[in-house]
């Protein structure tokens, strides 16, 4: 697919499905990001915090959303990327990201395309919602 930012409001970007979150994925992300919070890797710690098991890093989920968006949009044009986390992501969760063009904004004379995205698990639970502002070229 050609990366572009020539969109119309309501246009959909291709959905992207990711493989189930595994302990290996969390360990790799932990090492790569430097985020060694035990809630993401230590089962005993997670259970002592009231969880059944470890949960995925929120920034990992944000990265998946970003990956889905930048599959269609040149990442160099990304001006802003906000995410609201709605629910924890568990081991075994398969995440699907969908994204749509929400409209256009002018910020300080710069024309931007606004994309809204959502990460949902295999049970239909919304894990995170994002908005990305893409510079129009």
Image (spheres, helix red, strand yellow):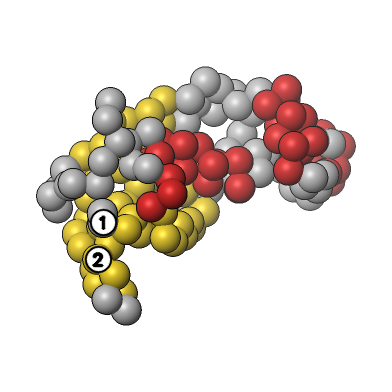
Are the residues at dot 1 and dot 2 in contact (C-beta closer than 8 Å)?
Answer: yes
Marking on residue 54? none
User: Going by the picture, which residue comes out furthest to the bottom?
Assistant: 108
**Furthest-front residue in this view:** 137
Residue 47 higher or lower than 109, as above or below: above
Residue 53 visible? The answer is no
Q: Is residue 96 above or below residue 79?
A: above
Marks 1 and 2, the one that precedes in the sequence: 2
Residue at 42 percent across and 60 percent down: it is 79
Q: Indicate the position of residue 26 as horizontal and vertical percent values.
A: 71, 32
Quadrant where the C terminus lies? bottom left
The percent coordinates of residue 73 (x first, y second) are: 34, 42
User: Which residue: 14% across, 52% down?
Assistant: 9
Q: Which residue is mark 1?
A: 136
* Residue under label 2: 111
Image position of 135 (left or right of 36) = left
In screen coordinates, is 137 left or right of 16? left
From the viewer's side, name the closer residue of 40 and 33. Answer: 33
* Residue 85 percent across, percent down from the top left: 52, 54
Q: Secondary structure at mark 2?
A: strand
Q: Residues within 10 Å of mark 1 (few under 14, many from 20)?
A: some
């Amino acid at each position: 697919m050609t990366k572009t930012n020539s969109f119309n409001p309501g246009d959909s970007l291709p959905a992207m499905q990711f493989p189930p979150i595994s302990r290996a994925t969390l360990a790799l992300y932990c090492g790569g990001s430097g985020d060694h919070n035990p809630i993401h890797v230590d089962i005993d710690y997670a259970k002592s915090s009231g969880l059944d098991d470890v949960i995925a890093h929120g920034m990992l989920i944000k990265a998946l959303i970003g990956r889905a968006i930048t599959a269609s949009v040149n990442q160099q044009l990304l001006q802003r990327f906000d995410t609201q986390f709605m629910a924890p992501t568990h081991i075994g969760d398969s995440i699907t990201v969908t994204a749509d063009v929400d409209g256009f904004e002018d910020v300080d004379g710069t024309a931007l395309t606004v994309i809204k995205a959502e990460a949902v698990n295999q049970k239909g639970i919304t894990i995170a919602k994002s908005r990305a502002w893409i510079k129009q070229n």
